[in-house]
Image (cartoon, rainbow, N blue to C red):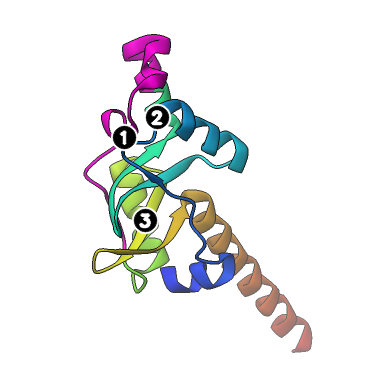
Amino acid sequence: MTIATILAGKGADVVTITADTSVQDALNVLAVRRIGAVPVMEGDRVVGIFSERDVIQCLAERGAEGLGRAVAEAMTAPVISVGRDEAALGALSLMTRRRVRHLPVVEGDRLIGFVSIGDLVKYRIDKIEADAEAMRSYIQAV
């Protein structure tokens, strides 16, 4: 299974922000959309990821004053990304090794999707359950 398969199941609509967005406004996007991270864009190019972890780090370092800073000062960069043809298990392994929970899916420099560790685990579990059901059906038919 590839990242393209996962994107096909969840859609490729991605909420993004720009590097000059304030940390407070970015935090509001995360809260309203009930998401854990958002790609930070400069034109069509992903220049960073802003996540819940970045909010915590910003507040720990700067206190409430950090909420008025630009996301560019708090985001995680450079970006770790994957392509649409990457195997889902490879992406899951990359997330584990790099200790990240979200990956932009890029083609060239263009953002085409965004996957979370939850997306990858869900599809992996669905595949395992489908395989188990197929095996049960086979055994019962014999």
Q: Which residue is at the front of the view, 50 or 86?
A: 50
In-image side of 140 versus 119 (left or right)? right
Q: Assess whether residue 65 is covered by the magenta stretch.
A: yes
Picture quadrant where residue 135 is located: bottom right
Instruction: Provide the residue designation for mark 1.
Output: 75
The amino acid on which the numbered mark 2 sits, given as a three-letter code, is Ser
The first of marks 3 and 2 along the sequence is 2
Q: Residues within 10 Å of mark 1 (few under 14, many from 20)?
A: many
Picture quadrant where residue 107 is located: bottom left
Q: Which residue is at the front of the view, 81 or 127?
A: 81
- As measured in the structure, the alpha-carbon distance from the residue carrying label 1 to the one carrying label 2 is 11 Å
Q: Residues within 10 Å of mark 2 (few under 14, many from 20)?
A: many
Q: Nearer the viewer, mark 1 or mark 2?
A: 2
Per the rendered image, the range of residues in magenta is 57-82
Q: Is residue 7 above or below residue 95?
A: below
Q: Which percent across, then down, holds residue 4?
A: 44, 73
The first of marks 1 and 3 along the sequence is 1
Q: Which residue is situated farthest in the right direction here?
A: 140
The amino acid on which the numbered mark 3 sits, given as a three-letter code, is Pro
Mark 1 lies on a secondary structure that is: loop
Q: Residue at x 33, y 12 (%)?
A: 62
In-image side of 48 versus 126 (left or right)? left
Q: Residue at x 31, y 39 (%)?
A: 19
Q: Does residue 27 appear anywhere in the picture?
A: yes
Q: Which mark is residue 104?
A: 3
In-image side of 104 versus 80 (left or right)? right
- As measured in the structure, the alpha-carbon distance from the residue carrying label 3 to the one carrying label 2 is 21 Å
Q: Which residue is situated farthest in the bottom direction here?
A: 142
Instruction: Provide the residue designation for mark 2.
Output: 22
Q: Which percent across, then down, holds residue 116?
A: 47, 51
